[in-house]
Amino acid sequence: MTSTGALPFAGVLVAALTRTDIANYVSALFEVYIALILIYILAQLVLGFGMRPPYSRTFDAVLKFLRDVCDPYLRLFRKFIPPLGMLDLSPMIAIIVLYALASVVTGAINGTL
């Protein structure tokens, strides 16, 4: 401890970050977002089959969070890709585009692009 009461290196950020570490972090963010989209799609599928639990605040809160996080990105694709009957292909195309974007961004950060 110093005379001010703070630890000597408490304000120092991790300085050993490399481009690979940053690329791995960005890649993990893309993977988490893709996982959230997949969970949202599965939740919509379950609701579509009528398997909604009786009034559940937790389920409603999770579904609202997923809707708020995933719908803005998915709406971009729903504008251009119309549903084929009851089949909505826009989430699949959105995930493929997200994978491609993740590859380009992490490659650019790594310097391997």
Image (cartoon, helix red, strand yellow):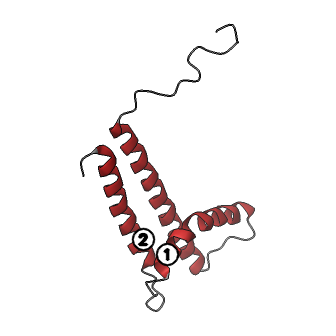
Image coordinates of residue 15 in percent, x first then y, are 44, 27
Q: Is residue 6 left or right of residue 16?
A: right
Nearest the viewer among 52 and 72 is 72
Task: Tell me if label 1 and label 2 are in contact, CB under 8 Å.
Answer: yes
| 108 in relation to 87, above or below | above
- Which quarter of the picture shows residue 19? top left
Nearest the viewer among 9 and 74 is 9
Task: Tell me the SS state at disc 1.
Answer: helix
- Which quarter of the picture shows residue 101? bottom left
Q: Is residue 68 left or right of residue 87?
A: right
Image coordinates of residue 79 in percent, x first then y, are 49, 82
Task: Tell me the SS state at disc 2.
Answer: helix
Three-letter code, disc 1:
Leu
Image coordinates of residue 81 in percent, x first then y, are 43, 84
Three-letter code, disc 2:
Ala
Nearest the viewer among 88 and 103 is 103
Disc sitting over residue 94 in the figure: 2
Q: Please rate how many residues cluster around mark 2, counting C-alpha atoms within 10 Å: few if below 14, some from 14 to 19, many from 20.
A: some
Q: Please rate how many residues cluster around mark 1, counting C-alpha atoms within 10 Å: few if below 14, some from 14 to 19, many from 20.
A: few
Q: Earlier in the sequence, mark 1 or mark 2?
A: 1
Q: What residue appears at the point 42 percent right and 48 percent down from the top-left corner?
A: 26
Residue underneath mark 1: 76
